[in-house]
């Protein structure tokens, strides 16, 4: 069920700064963390009386501590375990288009300093002070993911602010995924400005990637891996490369741009592999790029039976441990990937293993991959640890905003 309110329920319609509703922390809730920048209040930390329970999802309210001292302006959603998200530490802030333009403009200034072309994650949710909002930019087209009820309620104003600040002409609302369901919101993908006619070519790391914004995964491309693609490309000169869980060719196309002699891209999705082939064609790498559709674990076993050998193998799977209940199973899956991939590398070859699982921290992931390499009969040295690019900044107070880990090993012969 869609519990969002109309996009016209902006600050003026949702009561002004002087007569907003208030919500209050329980006396023993940790107010200090929120004062120091932690952006969330969990449901068991808030006094949820009948008045609070009746608030429409996305309502703006003043958050008070247990002594009734104002702490800031929050958005409330009683359908979510994250019952409040901090919008502004000024409890009298007006959430209008000018406020949104200021936040988007702040995010844009950093991206324009970092990148020479308008292809990047423009807004990374809480870390860019727009909680629950993800915006990826593809030239004059942008994809908005309104993953919090307040953003759903203000989607029209958010789109108008985005166009005013960046000049983008086409905007897709991608309202799908686990984060939406946790907020009690429906799923919907719809063009809300301009038109999107097909995959968009994205230049990155010397290659061209084809991003299907409407039918692809997430927003169509994973910008977060950009620096890790670049590092892998440095290892790939003259190499035979295996790109597992390749999606639209992320590591493989970058490796070819770095001088790889051949790339085999493996993914379970035929449409993703078709886009990867289009990217290889657009990049001038078609003759060196081949694909194989199938389950990555099964393909690894098949390649071993075929006696295949590679100089570089990169494994970039989906989140095997998206939440804590899946952690143990997820770590076993990461270990298994490493165990099956390690024997396919020549002595002195390079193995890149990635995790985008929030629940698996760096230490747990590193331990799992190390076990897998050992159980695959190999020894390895860890030569580089990579993270998400700077267009995916991390909010220091919120560990969940730093999720991506990439470990690059050099493997010797048998252990």
Image (spheres, rainbow, N blue to C red):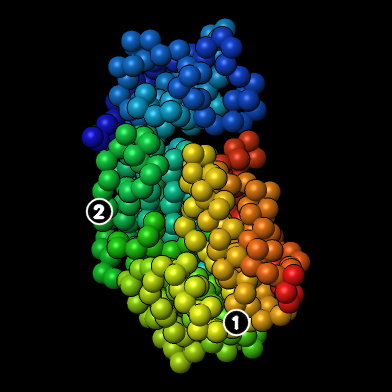
The residue at 45%/29% (across/down) is 82
- Out of 98 and 48, give the one closest to the viewer: 48
Q: Is residue 145 left or right of residue 124?
A: left
Q: Is residue 256 left or right of residue 131?
A: right
- Out of 276 and 7, give the one closest to the viewer: 276
Q: Quadrant of residue 138?
A: bottom left
Image vertical order of residue 297 relative to residue 239, above or below = above
Dot 2: element: strand
The residue at 56%/57% (across/down) is 334
Give the labeled residue for mark 2. Answer: 190
The residue at 49%/52% (across/down) is 320
Give the labeled residue for mark 1. Answer: 310
Image vertical order of residue 289 relative to residue 350, above or below = below
Could you tell me residue 139's position as x and y percent? 42, 66
Dot 1: element: strand
Query: Is disc 2 surrounded by few (<14), some (14 to 19) or many (20+) residues within 10 Å?
Result: few
Q: Earlier in the sequence, mark 1 or mark 2?
A: 2
The N terminus - image quarter: top left
Could you tell me residue 336's position as x and y percent? 56, 61
Image vertical order of residue 129 relative to residue 271, above or below = above
């Amino acid at each position: 069920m869609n519990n969002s309110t109309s996009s016209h329920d902006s600050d003026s319609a949702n009561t002004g700064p002087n007569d907003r509703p208030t919500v209050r922390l329980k006396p023993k809730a940790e107010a200090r963390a929120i004062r120091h920048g932690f952006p969330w209040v969990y449901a068991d930390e808030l006094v949820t009386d009948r008045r609070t329970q009746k608030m429409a999802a996305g309502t703006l309210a003043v958050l008070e501590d247990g002594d009734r001292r104002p702490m800031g302006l929050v958005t409330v959603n009683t359908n979510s375990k994250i019952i409040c998200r901090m919008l502004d530490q000024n409890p009298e802030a007006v959430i209008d288009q000018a406020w949104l333009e200021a936040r988007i403009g702040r995010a844009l200034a950093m991206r324009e300093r970092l990148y020479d072309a308008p292809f990047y994650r423009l807004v990374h949710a809480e870390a860019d002070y727009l909680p629950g909002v993800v915006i990826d930019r593809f030239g004059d087209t942008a994809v908005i993911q309104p993953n919090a009820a307040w953003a759903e309620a203000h989607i029209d104003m958010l789109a108008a602010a985005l166009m005013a600040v960046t000049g983008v002409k086409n905007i897709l609302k991608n309202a799908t995924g686990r984060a939406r369901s946790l907020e009690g919101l429906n799923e919907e993908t719809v063009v809300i400005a301009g038109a999107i006619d097909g995959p968009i070519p994205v230049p990155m790391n010397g290659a061209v990637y084809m991003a299907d914004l409407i039918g692809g995964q997430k927003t169509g491309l994973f910008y977060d891996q950009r620096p890790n693609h670049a590092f892998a490309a440095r290892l790939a000169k003259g190499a035979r490369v295996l790109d597992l869980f390749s999606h639209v060719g992320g590591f493989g196309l970058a490796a070819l741009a770095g001088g790889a002699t051949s790339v085999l891209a493996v993914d379970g999705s035929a449409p993703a592999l078709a886009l990867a082939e289009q990217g290889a064609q657009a990049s001038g790498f078609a003759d060196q790029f081949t694909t194989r559709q199938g389950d990555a674990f099964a393909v690894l076993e098949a390649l071993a039976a075929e006696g295949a050998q590679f100089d570089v193998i990169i494994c970039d799977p989906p989140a095997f441990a998206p939440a804590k209940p899946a952690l143990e199973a997820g770590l076993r899956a990461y270990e298994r990937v490493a165990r099956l991939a390690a024997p396919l590398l020549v002595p002195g070859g390079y193995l890149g293993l990635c995790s985008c699982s929030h629940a698996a921290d760096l230490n747990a992931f590193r331990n799992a991959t190390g076990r897998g390499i050992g159980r695959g009969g190999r020894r390895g040295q860890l030569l580089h640890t990579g993270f998400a690019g700077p267009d995916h900044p991390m909010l220091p107070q919120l560990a969940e905003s730093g999720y991506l880990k990439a470990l690059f090993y050099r493997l010797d012969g048998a252990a």
